[in-house]
Image (cartoon, rainbow, N blue to C red):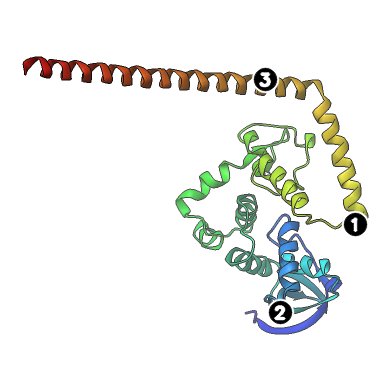
Amino acid sequence: MTTTRLKRKILKLEQIIFDRDIYPRQNYWWNTAYVYSQAMKSGAIFPPITVGLVGHKYLLVDGKHRQEALKLLKETHATCEIITGKNKQQLYIEAIRRNIAHGQVLTPYDKVRIIKRLEDMKIDTVTISKIVQVPMDKITQFVARRITLTPLGQTQILKAPLMHLSAEQIPMDDFEQDTLASRSEISLLNQMIQIFSNKQFPKQDRNFLYKVKELYALLDDFLKSKETKNSWFKIQEAERLSSDKKKQKEQQRKKKLSYDKKRKKRDTGKILKKKKGKR
C-alpha cells in the first residue's frame, strides 16, 4: 500500500515538469495567467503549486496558471507542495480532483478526454462520475456530443469550435485543434479582442509579435477575399431588409395608433352630441 507524505519546498520554475500524462488540462489560458500575475503583483496570496515527485522529477499536478503567472512576473522560484509515494496513474487522478475543485473550470473537452482516459484505465463508471462530477446517467450523452471518427476509425474528441463536426467522419489532418481553447469561434475572437482592448499582451515578446503579424496577414487576406465580400454583402442586405421590415411595421403601428385615436375622438364626439340632443 502506497503512502502519501506532503511537504513544502521552494523549487525553481524550470524544475517543474509539465507532463501531459498527468496534467488533466489540454491547454492553459494565458489570460487567466495574466490576471493571476496582476493579482500577485498587488499582493494577493495564492496556494502553493502542487507537484508529484516521481523518481527525481517534479511533475506538475496542480497550478499551471500560477506557474505561468510567476513566469510573467519574471520570478524564478515557487513554493510547492510535494506529493510523494504515488505513481503516475495515481497522480493523474489526484490532478483531476484538484483541478476540478478550484481555479479555472475544466472545459467539457477536458472532461471528455479525462473520461475516455479513465475508461482506458478500467475505472468503473460510478467512480468516473464522481471524479469528473458528471451525473452517471448523462456521461454517455456528454461524451457522444464531442466525439467523431477519423477515416481510420479512431475516436477523436472535438473542441467546442469544432463541435458541428461531431457524428461525422472527417479527415483530422485537415485541421489542428490543439491550440483551440475556447467554447466557440466567437469566444476565441472575443478573447483576442479583450487581450488587445485591455493591452494584456507582452509587447517585447518576439514570438508574440511574429504571431500578431501572421494573424494580421491572415485577416487581411480573409477580409479581401471574394467569398468574404460576398458573405458580408449578403449579411448587410439581410440586415437592410430586416431594418426595412421593422420600419414598415413601425409605420403601420403608428398609422394604426393615429387611426384609433381619431376614431376614439370621433366616437367621443358623437356620444357628446347625442347626450346634448337629449337635453
Name the mark on residue 205: 1
| 80 left or right of 12 in image | left
Mark 1 or mark 3: name the one nearer the start of the chain. Answer: 1
Q: Nearer the viewer, residue 148 or 241?
A: 241
Residue 65 can be seen in this image: yes
Q: Where does residue 33 sit, x and y in percent of width and height? A: 74, 63
Which residue lies under the disc numbered 3?
234
Q: Quadrant of the N terminus?
A: bottom right
Is disc 3 placed on a helix, strand or loop?
helix
Q: Where does residue 30 sit, x and y in percent of width and height? A: 76, 57
Name the mark on residue 150: none
Q: Image point 75% across, 59% down: which residue?
A: 20
Q: Image point 81% across, 30% down: which residue?
A: 222
Vertical relation: 174 (above or below) 180: above
Which residue lies under the disc numbered 2?
81
Q: Image point 91% across, 58% down: which residue?
A: 204
Please rate how many residues cluster around mark 3, counting C-alpha atoms within 10 Å: few if below 14, some from 14 to 19, many from 20: few
Q: Where does residue 71 sit, x and y in percent of width and height? A: 83, 68
Vertical relation: 157 (above or below) 37: above
Query: Disc 1 to disc 2, how far (Cα)?
Result: 31 Å
Mark 1 or mark 2: name the one nearer the start of the chain. Answer: 2
Query: Disc 2 to disc 3, how far (Cα)?
Result: 57 Å
Residue type pointed to by label 2: Glu
Residue type pointed to by label 3: Lys
Q: Are marks 1 and 3 in contact (CB under 8 Å)?
A: no
Residue type pointed to by label 1: Asp
Is disc 2 placed on a helix, strand or loop?
strand
- Count of number-bearing discs: 3
| 102 left or right of 262 in image | right
Q: Where does residue 31 sit, x and y in percent of width and height? A: 73, 57
Between marks 1 and 3 in the image, the one whose residue lies nearer the viewer: 3
Q: Image point 54% across, 46% down: which residue?
A: 142
